[in-house]
Amino acid sequence: MLRGHGYRRVADAVRQLSAKTRLIDQLILARVAAGLTQAQLAAKLRCSQSRISKIEDSQDADLSLGDIHAYARIVGLKLQLDLR
């Protein structure tokens, strides 16, 4: 069992990773809520299942706007971009 400093290091690492995958986490949750497997989503996007897996295993900063838009559209999300 981790205690003290070791626990804090692990907790910090988890928080940092979570902050880098917030968008991807939302996309995955929406895919699951839509009842789609990675293979089904890939078929709708006309790409391979491994491409969907790579998207879902990446970090938010690695995604292209096109990937986000296409994925969101298929799982029933509306992409809204706000620049200020």
Image (tube, rainbow, N blue to C red):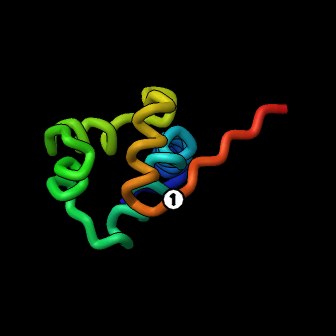
Residue 44 image offset from top left, x and y in percent: 24, 52
Instruction: Tell how many labels.
Output: 1
**Quarter assignment of residue 55:** top left
Question: Horizontal placement of 54 versus 64: left or right?
Answer: left
Q: Residue at x 35, y 70 (%)?
A: 34
Residue 20 image offset from top left, x and y in percent: 52, 38
Q: Residue at x 40, y 43 (%)?
A: 70
Q: Residue at x 20, y 41 (%)?
A: 46
The quarter in which the N terminus is drawn is bottom left
Residue 6 image offset from top left, x and y in percent: 47, 45
Question: Horizontal placement of 39 versus 75: left or right?
Answer: left
Q: Residue furthest right?
A: 84
Q: Residue at x 33, y 67 (%)?
A: 32
Q: Is residue 33 above or below residue 31?
A: below
Tell me the amino acid under the disc marked 1.
Answer: Leu
Residue 36 image offset from top left, x and y in percent: 25, 65
Q: Choose between 25 and 44: the one closer to the eye.
A: 44
Q: Is residue 21 above or below residue 34?
A: above
The quarter in which the C terminus is drawn is top right
Q: Choose between 60 and 43: the one closer to the eye.
A: 43
Residue at image mark 1: 77
Q: Residues within 10 Å of mark 1 (few under 14, many from 20)?
A: some
Numbered disc 1: secondary structure:
loop
